[in-house]
Structure formats: C-alpha cells, structure tokens
Image (cartoon, helix red, strand yellow):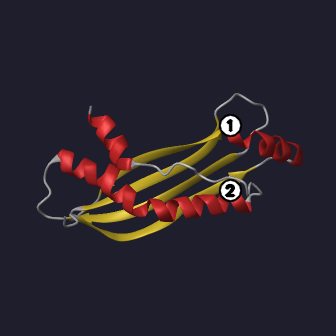
Amino acid sequence: MTKNYKIVTQFLRDISGETPNVETFFFVKNQIKNYQLVIDITSKALKNKHIEVDTIFKFRDSKENQKKSYFEMTNVTIVKIDEKIEGKKELEKIILCDLQNEIYPFLEKSFLNLLHNSGFTQVEFEKKVNFQDLYNKRQN
C-alpha cells in the first residue's frame, strides 16, 4: 500500500505539566491510577494540499478530586496530501488513522518523558492506541 500523504514537518507547540504543590504531588502519586489519557485531533486546511494536524494529549484524573496535576501536550504535524485524494472520507482516514499511527510512537515517548520528568516515573501506557479501531468505530 502506498502512502497518500507526506509529513512535511512536526513540532511540539505546547507541553505543560502542572502540580501546584508538594501535597498535591504526593496525593496524585498515590492516585495516578485514576488518570486517563485523552487524545483530541483537530485539523486545518492550508494552501497547496497541505493540512495542519494538531494532536493533543491530555492526562487527567477521571475522578473529581480537589488535588490534581494537569498534563497536556500539543503536537503539530504539517502534511501534504497526494493530489489524487479528493474525498472527505479518504482525507479523514489519513488524518485520524494513518497519520496518527505513524506519529504515535514519537508522541507517546514525548508525553511519557513529560510525566516521568514531572516525578511520575511509574506511569506507562499499557495499551497502545489503535487508531484504526477508533476510526472504524467512528464510521459505524
């Protein structure tokens, strides 16, 4: 299968880890199992078949707690779409599935570095994100 897009460049636009104080750090360290990875993907058309794709990782507490740490990273990927691609469905699959599968290892490593460097060294993402499955579920 030939690739119908090309990554022109990618960069981390924003990376943020916030833990307001020591008490919160120790509380979160004990509650980190309640944190979940949330991924948002947005895109914006540029000129000449180029698209800006923002992939946003957020790691947040699934429970309502007063003491929380906040982690977020926005990665920007500029892609050039093959001239033959015209349909919205094809474009959607490139942005939400194919591209994400390609850049995910870099994003995961970068985000885990943020978490580990923030003192949460025990955090690992056990399940790899399957963008193909997510895309298929979105279509149904």
Check the image and name the residue furthest to the front: 126
Q: Is residue 140 left or right of residue 121?
A: left
Check the image and name the residue furthest to the bottom: 8
Q: Quadrant of the N terminus?
A: bottom left
Position of residue 49 relative to residue 86, above or below, is: below
Q: Is residue 126 left or right of residue 88?
A: right
Q: Residue at x 23, y 66 (%)?
A: 3
Q: Which residue is mark 1?
A: 34
Mark 1 neighbour density, 10 Å: few (under 14) some (14–19) many (20 or more):
few
Q: Quadrant of the C terminus?
A: top left
Q: Residue at x 74, y 54 (%)?
A: 120
- SS category of the residue bearing label 1: helix
Residue type, label 1? Asn
Question: Horizontal and vertical percent for residue 98?
Answer: 31, 56
Q: Residue at x 72, y 54 (%)?
A: 122
Q: What label does residue 115 carry, if any?
A: 2
Question: Horizontal and vertical percent for residue 33?
Answer: 69, 41
